[in-house]
Amino acid sequence: MEARAVSAERGNDLREPVPFESFFRAHYPTVVRIAHGVVGDVHAAQDVAQDVFIAAERRFSESGLPAHAAVWVRVAAVHTALNSVRGQRRRHLRQLRAGAAAAPASPEELVVERESRREVREALGRLPRRSATVLVLRHSGLSYAEVAEAMDVSAGQVGTMLRRAEAALRKEVEHATRS
């Protein structure tokens, strides 16, 4: 009862969440899922989601949530997650140069699977941002129409962009495995 009185004094009603809070609750699971598809770790994906929603709140705090805010957070999730992967790759390279290599601590199948995922994430991080974005958005479950809206292209362009991005990703993975 006291919380409602305090809240009412501030002009907020506890029964009705503020618009950004509702927006956050509605889109947080999607942003985490998209980020997880890129970074491959649920905790890192949650960190990415936190960064995305902090940026969204700052960006939209004065003007209110525009119609494209949901698309904005999805694309921001991809970009932020890719930046995280690129940062991890740079840290890994610095550690290798310093001679700090982690010893495998899990069974062989898990190591091979993790290595494959890491190679794909690193290859994704080397792709141009537009190619990586289209791959992540589509493979995170968005339809062609949703990908088109998020990337501000026609739905007909999405298929071509995907095929080119997938081919580029395959080349990057093959190049990395040969090196």
Image: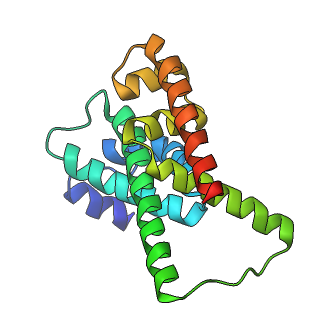
Note whether residue 18 is visible: no
In-front residue for pair 178/151: 178
> Which residue is the extreme one toward the top?
156
Q: Residue at x 43, y 60 (%)?
A: 86
Q: Position of residue 61 (x, y in %)?
A: 19, 47
Q: Is residue 1 left or right of residue 111?
A: left
> Which residue is the extreme one toward the bottom?
99
Count of all numbered marks drawn on residues in the image: 0
Look at the image and tell me in which quarter the C terminus lies.
Answer: bottom right
In-front residue for pair 171/111: 171
Q: Position of residue 19 (x, y in %)?
A: 32, 41
- Residue 157: image quadrant is top left
Note whether residue 110 is visible: yes
Q: Position of residue 72 (x, y in %)?
A: 34, 37
In this rendering, is residue 156 above or below 57?
A: above
In this rendering, is residue 161 above or below 62?
A: above
Q: Residue at x 25, y 31 (%)?
A: 66
In this rendering, is residue 49 above or below 43?
A: above
The colour style of the image is: rainbow
Q: Position of residue 28 (x, y in %)?
A: 48, 48
Q: Residue at x 31, y 56 (%)?
A: 54
Q: Residue at x 50, y 74 (%)?
A: 92
Look at the image and tell me in which quarter the N terminus lies.
Answer: bottom left
> Which residue is the extreme one toward the front?
178
